[in-house]
Image (cartoon, helix red, strand yellow):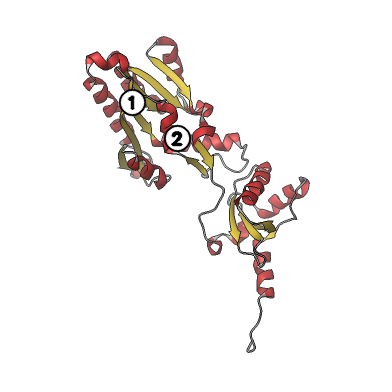
Amino acid sequence: MEEQVYVFIDDSSLWIEGQKYRAREQELQDTEQDPRYRVDLGKFLDLVVAKRSVVEAHLYGSKPPPNDSVWKAARERNYVVKVFDRAGGILRGREKEVDVAMGVDITKAACKCEQDYKDDTTFIIVTGDRDFKSPVVGAMEEGVKVELWGWKHGISIQYRKLANESSLFTLNTLDDIASEFSFTSYKSTREACDIDAAKALVFKDIPNGNKSLDNLAGYLLCLKRLFYTTSLPHDDKQYQDVIVAFPKSKPDVVLKQIEAVKSPYEKPISYPTYISEKRQKKPTGPND
């Protein structure tokens, strides 16, 4: 029989721990999580499934979502998506039903697997949370193989012990395949008018095109700070001006860093200064 898999994904483990991984990877100095981290869910599923037959795929998360696009992509690929409200009161903001629902579904799936097929069945579980150890062990007691995927810094030591104790359990780190399913989106989703001018600089006369934006982002990475880019129209269509917002840092501190690093770009100016220059250049009418 063809090997079949059931997939169970704890969205917060994939997403929140992924943001922490990306912040560490880029050595960000001003935040512990990189909100620009993005996941290509299709590529991710292809990687962990590895050409096996998917019987069911589940995604579990809480409202509000960290990124609606992940849930949308999951539904488009016929995932069973389960979404729950976050806790209120003293536990406000915490996930309260996600772990229970995922644990129950893992147990139910293990129990309903036909005995003749269990040797050819693998549960792919994406989490590092020790709260799932009991259903993981329960699935293995039913004779089901389990492959657990988690971020290196977010995997409970309980799973590391389990990997040494059972031949049915395989532990994998998402760090090893992150470059194949995730990326960083540096472009801001905000309009220029909505950007906090006090937190932004402008790089002028950047050649037009996404490649130039990517090159600028590559240079800005050396600053090790969270930033977003927004392209602005230029009088010369061959160029663009680029707003770079630093939501967690002061622009004057960033400017000092830029001055200390060899740069292929002209020194940027503050966004308020840029706005002022634009207003001064604006042509006046006969009645002005």
Which quadrant of the figure has residue 89? top left
Q: Residue at x 40, y 27 (%)?
A: 49
153 and 48: which is toward the camera? 48
Q: Is residue 204 left or right of residue 142?
A: right
Circle 1: residue type: Ser
248 and 17: which is toward the camera? 17
- Tell me where residue 94 appears, x and y as whole percent: 38, 40
Which quadrant of the figure has residue 203? bottom right
Q: Residue at x 53, y 45 (%)?
A: 36
Q: Which residue carries the number 1 mark?
A: 53
Q: Is residue 129 visible?
A: no
Looking at the image, is mark 2 or mark 1 earlier in the sequence?
Answer: 2
| Callout 1 crowding tier (Cα within 10 Å): few <14, some 14–19, many ≥20 | few
Q: Quadrant of the N terminus?
A: top left
Q: Is residue 210 visible?
A: yes
Q: Is residue 149 left or right of residue 266?
A: left
Residue 43 — which label? 2
Vertical relation: 198 (above or below) 282: above
Q: Residue at x 34, y 28 (%)?
A: 7
